[in-house]
Image (tube, helix red, strand yellow):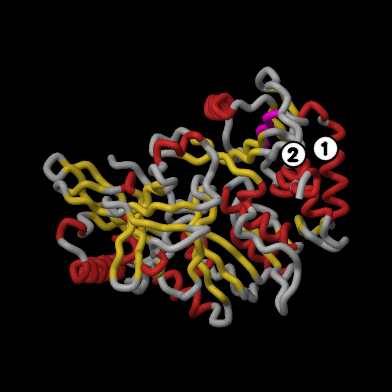
Amino acid sequence: MSGETASLLGMIEAHPERALIIHHDQPFTPGSLSRAARDIRTRHPQLQGANVALQCADSGDFLVRLIALDGFAREILLLPPCLSGPALKGTLSRAGSTHLLDHTGANPVAPPSPAAAAGGETLWLFTTSGTTGEPKVFSHTLRSLTVSTRAGRGGARECRWGLAYQPHRFAGIQVVLQALASGNVLVLPPSGDIKASMEAFARHQVNTLSATPSQWRNFLSHGALRGCALEQITLGGEIADQAILSALARQFPAARIVHIYASTEAGVGFSVADGRAGFPVAWLDQGPPLQLRMSAGGSLLIRSPALSRSEALLPRLTADGYLDTQDQVIASGDRVYFLGRASGVINVGGNKVHPEEVESLVREVPGVRNALVSGRSSPIMGQLVLLEVQADDLSAAACAELKRRIRDHCRQHLPKYKLPALINIVQELAVSESGKVERKHCG
């Protein structure tokens, strides 16, 4: 494939004229999307070959602009709608953007760069926050982003996708591209409200839904999924522990449940569909195209054609081309389990505690909806383990009983240094706009 057929616009124009995207209860066909995208190209010829930052609060407007820009602009920087002020200016500068396309139109932000070479693939730039909170930029192309997508309709079951992620995020784009590449219907949520989104998904018979484990816990606890006859469930973005996998299996016994390992820098790595947390140890040292290894320090190494092209990854590549994902893993029996990010480790008296390991254990306790572990500074121990537990509104006596059961369960399975020193019961845990529980820095 080359030229227009290798672009996002060419992809959708290859589909028959039927609903492809549903937004605010309105269907958009390949033809209507194509006309809207080509109109943007006609109105903004200065964006051809330019480095364009794309920022839209409305997911439908965002996708139409994205369709217009792929194969037309040299680079597309996908920005969260909340980014503004100095943070926005700094991100645009680091990415080398020359124009910002938002609800006000196409506005120049820097002098134009030299014209792009003919036939070059458009780079898609994604932002992700590091431990300092400063956004980092990783690049992909439509080709690398669609390595694992399946094109074409067919089979006994037609997927009707719901978009629970924000479309500017890597996970959101994966859902968008899978739907658009296959020609299946993609239902966009009317807002960020869980109830309104799920009502829209049920109204339009969504049967395939992807979300983070934190989002799935909220969906289940709020009863937001009762109207959706889900047949395919996907989890990504966070560690999928056994508690959430089992809860989804009980709620949707007929659904195929898959958890995916993917990241903005590594691309889509692999998926696990056997209902168990982690992945088979037999997958290590296998391949190609995907190859997995464990480093001597317990970090997952991955070599894949979907890796980002960003130069920022070069320091994390081994001599033979493996990316250090910085995700810590441990092999136990026939399984490899994720412990958490190396950067998130809590230091308790010189001992390392992975917050995700403690959280996963606490979620096994009946009555716990979700859990969040963070480190609190201690002049003696360096840090202490602080546990916040999301549970229903409880009386003082019920809170005390839940804390007792949590402590007993932790004592049975954890060494003393990993035990929570403090436990707080809360009604809600904040979930970021990327769908992940918001982790707190040590304080």
Quadrant for residue 338, please give it. Answer: bottom left
Q: At 50% across and 72% down in the image, what residue appears? A: 273
Pinpoint residue 352: horizontal percent, then vertical percent.
22, 51
Q: Determine whether, in the image, residue 418 is placed left or right of residue 223.
A: left
Q: Is residue 161 above or below residue 130?
A: below
Instruction: Name which residue type carries label 1.
Output: Ile
Residue with the most extreme bottom position:
253
The CA span between labels 1 and 2 is 9 Å
Q: Secondary structure at mark 2?
A: helix
Quadrant for residue 292, please give it. Answer: bottom left
Reading the image, the residue beneath label 2 is: 69
Instruction: Name which residue type carries label 2.
Output: Leu
Query: In the image, which residues are magenta?
Result: 50-55
Q: Determine whether, in the image, residue 18 is placed left or right of residue 105.
A: right
Q: At 58% across and 82% down in the image, what residue appears? A: 254
Q: Nearer the viewer, mark 1 or mark 2?
A: 2
Tell me the quadrant of the picture where the C terminus can be found: top left
| Badge 2: residue crowd in 10 Å (few <14, some 14–19, many ≥20) | many
Pinpoint residue 29: horizontal percent, then vertical percent.
84, 57
Pinpoint residue 133: horizontal percent, then vertical percent.
43, 36
- Disc assigned to residue 57: none
Residue with the most extreme left position:
380
Reading the image, the residue beneath label 1 is: 40
Q: Is residue 34 above or below residue 195?
A: above
Total marks in image: 2
Q: At 51% across and 65% down in the image, what residue appears? A: 271
Pinpoint residue 122: horizontal percent, then vertical percent.
69, 39
Q: Determine whether, in the image, residue 273 is placed left or right of residue 400.
A: right
